[in-house]
Amino acid sequence: MQLSQIDERYRAPAPETGGYVFNQTMLRVKDPEVSVAFYRDVMGMQLVKAIPFEAFAFTLYFMGYIDGPEAYPATEGDRFVHAFGQPAMLELTHNWGTESQQGAVYHDGNAAPQGFGHIGFCVPDVDAACARFEGLGVEFVKRPGDGKMKGIAFIKDPDGYWIEILSSRDIAQVVASVG
Amino acid sequence: MQLSQIDERYRAPAPETGGYVFNQTMLRVKDPEVSVAFYRDVMGMQLVKAIPFEAFAFTLYFMGYIDGPEAYPATEGDRFVHAFGQPAMLELTHNWGTESQQGAVYHDGNAAPQGFGHIGFCVPDVDAACARFEGLGVEFVKRPGDGKMKGIAFIKDPDGYWIEILSSRDIAQVVASVG
């Protein structure tokens, strides 16, 4: 069934947009050593490219999921094409010097003024993932058993950005349960 | 070459994170009719699932790139699994009633207080894409020829969120040009 048969809003996009890829989501981070370690060791992403910009005094860290050794391009040029051509990269921006500031530097978007809300990760097993996060000392906004929407969790990254943890297998039931 | 041979920060993630997918980026939107039309007709995404939550007075609109008719699941349950299991979905949250407010409702993250910066799309040809955006009346933050970083552009979505437009083929040259 074509989704466009269900509702006008679902109709297919213009053919001129062929080849467009939703490549990146950019979040500013206070300390890249901490954030790169978090997204690698807790969330399982890999640092694909770190790009310093001397002229602007910032460095961009591109992280994503990479399947298999063949996805690790051997040349610098190929790593660029890979990082910027694939979907679902996380771009962490480090404005030099923020790491030595006291306390939180950035706004998570959920307190006022609101805007951006969260990034979200599908995992094979929400409870197993959250038990592992607990063991790693990750801060929770909402555990899977908390609140009305059982079965999904929200954790915080080192800057306080919210990360939803969900399972695609279970999400229909989660949604149905809150009506 | 393994990236982990280049730098400690590039080392492989823990095997316990196998199967994790960076599924979604959530942005609050003032008017979903306007935003769904923008991401569909301008950016070429498709609305995969619209999920109203009566109990919370909001609706979530999940949009993404869908390749081929076989990717349009026939059953409601399969559409859930698809929407929440694939990378690079955009989750637009509509808190009911915001569409009748005057002016901008949400904060783009680039004015103070900063945090989230932008989402970014790879396109086959930045100039061609931007010429099309101009014709569609899209607002620009930066045209490809503006500023020091030639060859990339930033446009605004209907809520003012920034969208980077880049080509993976050209990005290494863009970066090299600013040193």
Image (tube, coloured by chain):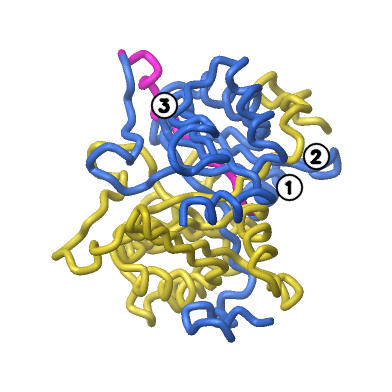
Chain colours: A blue, B yellow
Task: Write the residue at 36% across / 74% down.
Answer: B33
Name the residue type under label 3.
Asp
Task: Write the residue at 85% across / 38% down.
Answer: A69
Tell me if residue A86 can be seen.
no
Q: Is residue B141 left or right of residue B50?
A: left
Q: Nearer the viewer, residue B150 or A87?
A: A87
- Labelled disc at residue A78: 1
Element under disc 3: loop
Name the residue type under label 1.
Asp
Tags 2 and 3 in contact by the CB under 8 Å rule? no
Mark closer to the observer (2, 3): 3
Task: Write the residue at 51% across / 82% down.
Answer: A7
Q: Is residue A118 left or right of residue A84?
A: left
Q: Please provide the residue range marked out in magenta.
A: A86-102
Name the residue type under label 2.
Ala
Pointer 3 residue: A159
- For disc 1, the chain is A
Q: Which numbered disc flags the more N-terminal residue, 2 or 3?
A: 2
Q: Does the magenta stretch include residue A101?
A: yes
